[in-house]
Image (cartoon, grey):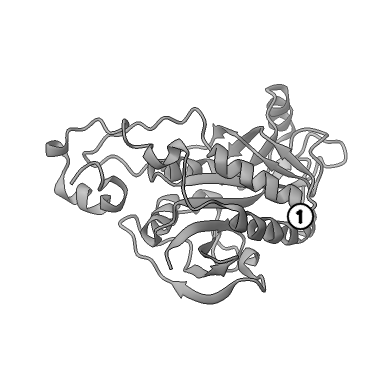
Amino acid sequence: MTVDIGIIGGSGLYDMKELTDREERQISTPFGDPSGPYVVGTLRGRRVAFLARHGAGHRILPSELNFRANIYGFKALGVERILSASAVGSLKQEYEPLHILVPDQFFDRTRGRISTFFGRGLVAHIAFAHPVCPDLSAVAADSAQAVGATVHRGGTYVNMEGPQFSTLAESTLYRAWGMDVIGMTNLQEAKLAREAEICYATLALVTDYDSWHPDHDSVTVDLIVANLMQNAATAQKTIAEAVGRVGSVRACACKDALATAIITRPEHVPEQTKKELAIIIGKYIK
């Protein structure tokens, strides 16, 4: 059975009784090693692959994540859709801890992260005005609602560098800009998934109010972990529900994202680059 759905988040996500026929797959990529082995199994009749974003025991900083290897590994497994789950801070009063927001926009505050497969003699510019898959995001939001979560549809995820949490000045500025939630990992995943023509949607699991809120001006790991434990159970139920709801045929534009994005003429692309990116560009450049 083809692995067509990827899930990326904490290692607790695949600790669910419904996931059967489990096996670990080690994937090597031209960009180095992913965060860890992919746990492949059967969930709601679909073959899925889980990846612990920060590795076993949560040992990889957001800035240290090998985003290219992680997404390339999913592509190598045949994945066409990625559901992401990650902890975020809320920048609005109405997005309370334990709520879920399914963002439709990102704002980049990272510095120097590699977030493209291209270069090395091959230039491509994907359209990224709408950075998540609308179809998969709708399934994610509907699924969260179906399992009883409080869900907010749409909004902007600020991707900060970290690993430190926001200063009060930063948090206040993001609120003034109208941003909705803040996290450290999802933007690079979304960019690379789009380049790989994989649908991407994320469940932003609210753990705290960042530092702007008078009751949360000193965000602590203890506070976040306590809420994460509750969020993990909701995320498990939501992902299982979403896997059962995802259709077998993609009708979105994500599947053809590279069709008009590659600028370099095929005869000028180095053979090594063609070889490394064959699973991504193979239907456009031989």
Q: Residue furthest top?
A: 176
Relative to 168, does residue 81 appear above or below in the rendering? below
Which amino acid lies under the numbered mark 1 shown in the image of this protein? Val
Give whichever of 197, 143 is nearer the camera. Answer: 143
Give whichever of 135, 266 is nearer the camera. Answer: 135
Residue drawn 43% across the image and 53% down it: 71
Image spot of residue 202 (x, y percent):
60, 46
Give whichever of 216, 267 is nearer the camera. Answer: 267
Q: Of helix, strand and loop, which one carries label 1? A: loop
Side of 217 relative to 279 (left or right): right
Task: Tell me which corner region of the image, top left, top right, bottom left or bottom right, holds residue 155.
Answer: top right
Residue drawn 43% across the image and 71% down it: 25
| Mark 1 Cα-neighbour bin, 10 Å: few <14, some 14–19, many ≥20 | some
Side of 44 relative to 227 (left or right): left
Image spot of residue 183 (x, y percent):
63, 43
Q: Residue furthest right?
A: 215
Give whichever of 275, 53 is nearer the camera. Answer: 275
Q: Residue furthest left?
A: 267
| Residue behind mark 1 | 147
Image spot of residue 83 (x, y percent):
56, 51
Image spot of residue 40 (x, y percent):
49, 69
The mark total stands at 1
Asked if residue 164 shows in the view, the reply is: no
